[in-house]
Image: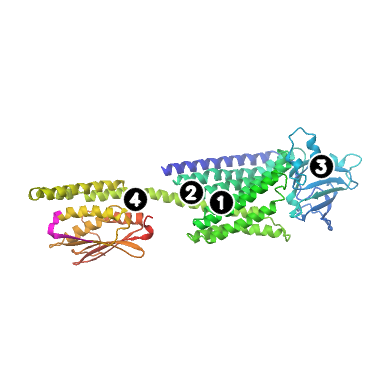
Amino acid sequence: MMKIIGGRIWTAVSVVLMLLMLTSAVWIGMRYYVSMDIYKTPSMFLEGEYSVDGGEWKPIDPDNPINDHFHKIVFKGKAPQKLLLYFGSVTVSSKNVWYSLKTTDGTAIASYSFEEAKLAYEHSLTDRPMALDMPDTPGYRVQTVYTDYLTGGADVTEDSELIFEVEYPYQDMLVSFSECVDITAYYSEGMYLRFFYDALPPILLFSLVCFFGLFFFPVASFILGKIDYKYLAFGFLSFLWGLYMIMQQVSGYLNLWINDPTVCMMLDKVIGYGFVAAVLFYFKSNMRSAGTRIGANIAATVYLSFAITVFVLHLSHVCDLNASSMTMHIAAAVCIVAMIVLLCFEKQDNRNALFFLLSWLPLLLTVAIDVLDQFVHLPGAHYFNYGLAITMIVQIVRLIGDLRFQYKEAIRYQQMQKELYEAKVGVMVSQIRPHFIYNALTSIAMMCQIDPDRAQEATITFADYLRGNMDSLHQTTPVPFATELDHLKKYLYIEKMRFADLLNIEYDIQTVDFQLPLLSIQPLVENAVKHGVGMKEDGGTVTVATKETDTAYEVIITDDGVGFDTEAPKPNDGRTHVGMENTKKRLHDMCGAYVEITSVIGEGTTARVILPKEGQPQ
């Protein structure tokens, strides 16, 4: 059944992968046949120079992005002829900045400020946006400027020098210009074409990640027959990672569909905070000790409390989410460090905890680089997404490998249960072979004339013995040794009735406080009776003993029979000799036990069953 369900899950995953490949093929074909008339500037649409925070003027490099940290950056220069001749519009996609575009004599061409946004919304028919209550919050904005405004009119000509000022209003944080402003020149519908060409492929890819997060890991956990919190937590983490990466691609386009810039920013931040919370809960799911789990719950609760607080402050127009970013970054760092410390104290499986921590090393290193970039400007910093991608891929590979192992273990367990059932049938059949029944009934029949009362007792004992063998077919878990001993005494009672004075039974039971598979000792006792004492002319004694050591429980079956050579090959007598092998396998699979057999020819045999205390049910 598990194989069938697992096969259906893999079929569903294959269908999704095929659909993704088909969509990608359609996208590649459309890119090939549909022309894209876009001029994507890596830095700035002006040719000239710029100044950061009132510093010296530096030339604009048209081939490289501008990564300078700033609070106010000013560009001055002329629009390139290529832009003026071939493109109809310039779109400015901004994040958390105010800006203005004007000539050197003060003629305004385009701007984005709170006053402008307020005036625009007052003349529109839309509902009152949140931005009107947040004068210090630029949010995410997309604005189009037609190139006619850059070349036409008496005040603005092709030779006019333009000034583009950008202001980042958050004084406590530094940000680079390329993070805040993205400029695209196009002829028509450029932003939508750019979205289709640049953003759609990663959106499709991370949509697949979301699918895996929502369905693959949780369903795989259910297939294993239990709800594993670790897989559910990672499924949620994968879903939010995919959503977070999708938001990274679409955040610059949100204002095309959502009119309120502050709402665009809020969606981006909330998804980011949700992703960090998912990381914390995934860390917690890898902890097993009660103490570390309590500490993890506290850390996750602290972070969620901060996230809810800053969200409420944003909705109350007290402090927007971007202004609270540094606070949330510090809270996230403290809580994740706390999780790492707790994992270091995880004592139940230090090896797995260490490997789990090492798998997050790429992300931690890139976060450290980005934090350092806030204080010391590092060229080409902001590697967070790369470190995150590497870490998540490692986690996915690790979890899929773990699922594969557990799936195989589940299949192996089913196979073991089948073999166990077959073994128990074999044990039962071996104990009630026709000649055994014949010998028992013959002995009882002879006893009916000599001692009817004892014959009645023997009949009841024999019936109970047969019932115990039949009940063993339905027993799938270990039983107390007292139960096994009671059944064993019934068997020896019948054998004693057959061998009379040739068979002596002794018991040295020092402990019964352990469990073992039903009918796992009887084959050893049967060998002692039949092949030990039974092969000796004057009979002998079979002793059943138990004892407890510091690490294990032992069951010892001893006989003073004929003995045998333990190194000699098994005799070719037409018998399969699988009874003992089945017994050993059942003891090992169910209790982690093993059997030691020693024998001396002419002196007897000792079979020792050693059951480790670690394998005993709690």
Q: Amino acid type of disc 4?
A: Thr
Using the image, tell me which numbered label, if any, was put on residue 477: 4
Query: Picture coordinates of residue 350 (x, y %)?
Result: 50, 61
**SS of the residue at dot 2?**
loop
Q: Earlier in the sequence, mark 1 or mark 3?
A: 3
Q: Position of residue 275 (x, y in %)?
A: 61, 49
What residue span does the magenta drawing correspond to?
497-507
Nearer-N-terminus badge (4/3): 3
Query: Could you tell me residue 195's position as x and y percent?
Result: 69, 42
Which of the labelled discs sits on residue 488, or is there none? none
**Marks 2 and 3, the one that precedes in the sequence:** 3
Q: Is residue 520 left or right of residue 399?
A: left
What is the spatial separation of the Cα atoms under label 1 and label 3, in whole angstroms?
43 Å
Q: Give the residue pinned by disc 3.
A: 115
Q: Could you give the CA–CA distance between mark 2 and mark 3, rounded to whole angstroms?
A: 53 Å
Amino acid type for the residue under numbered disc 3: Glu
Disc 2 target residue: 228
